[in-house]
Image: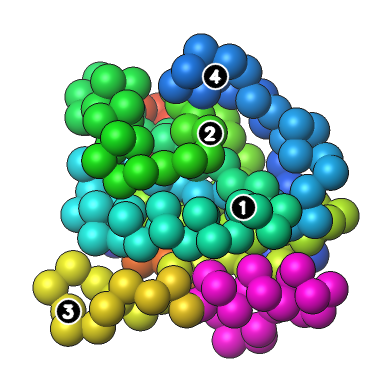
Amino acid sequence: MPSSFPPAGLGTEAPDFSLPALDGNRVSLRDFDRAPALLVAFLCNHCPYVRHVERGFAGLAGEYQPGGVAIVAVCSNDSDAYPDDGPDGLRQQVERAGFTFPYLVDDNQEVARDYRAVCTPDFFVFDAERRLAYRGQMDASRPGSALPVTGAALRAALDAVMAGEPAPADQRPAVGCSIKWRPGNAPGLP
């Protein structure tokens, strides 16, 4: 069983960040101040769970961004040990999946630790006040399953937050590959 942080509690404030994007610009939490909702997705290029949902996630983003939802992806994996998760691999993923949002590189893994991310994919939805409203899976589809990628759980959370309502109480944890921590960075159990 991989070590992990206890989950961040609903209602907690979004941790601040300032990270380089694949295009060379720095992106920070305050860049999304005007958005009525913020979706932070911990992704990577090599994980089969991410690859299973990446095109569906790109489609979901394309539907929700015009309505004001801000979306940002973060890759926190150790790219020395997993070179496919380095900037070149992430650029290939952006092209392959059709991502239209900033993709940030968390090389020192501080943002993953601050957000208490444990796997890829791991989705965090924050309301207009940047309070955590949802944390969990995109939907019930998994690699090799017969269930289609719909984004149902994430859509329900985003729809509720955009309507000024609480996200559904039934929140299922994200399932995927563990964050690939650099030596000495792995969180300990409480």
**Gap in angstroms between the C-alphas marked 1 and 4:** 21 Å
Q: Residue 20 carries which label?
A: 4
> In the picture, residue 150 is in which quadrant?
bottom left
Please state the horizontal and vertical placement of residue 40, each as a whole percent of the image. Answer: 58, 49
Say what amino acid the circle numbered 1 marks: Gln
* Disc 3: CA contacts within 10 A as few (<14), some (14-19) or many (>=20): few
Does residue 151 appear in the picture of this structure? yes
Say what amino acid the circle numbered 2 marks: Pro
Mark 1 lies on residue: 65
Mark 2 lies on residue: 102
Say what amino acid the circle numbered 4 marks: Pro
Residue that appears at 64% across and 25% down:
27
Span of residues in magenta: 153-172
**Gap in angstroms between the C-alphas marked 2 and 1:** 12 Å
Residue that appears at 66% across and 84% down:
168
**Gap in angstroms between the C-alphas marked 4 and 2:** 9 Å
Residue that appears at 69% across and 59% down:
67
Say what amino acid the circle numbered 3 marks: Ser
Please state the horizontal and vertical placement of residue 122, each as a whole percent of the image. Answer: 46, 56
Does residue 79 appear in the picture of this structure? no
> In the picture, residue 43 is in which quadrant?
top left
- SS of the residue under disc 2: loop
* Disc 4: CA contacts within 10 A as few (<14), some (14-19) or many (>=20): some
Residue that appears at 58% across and 35% down:
111
Mark 3 lies on residue: 145
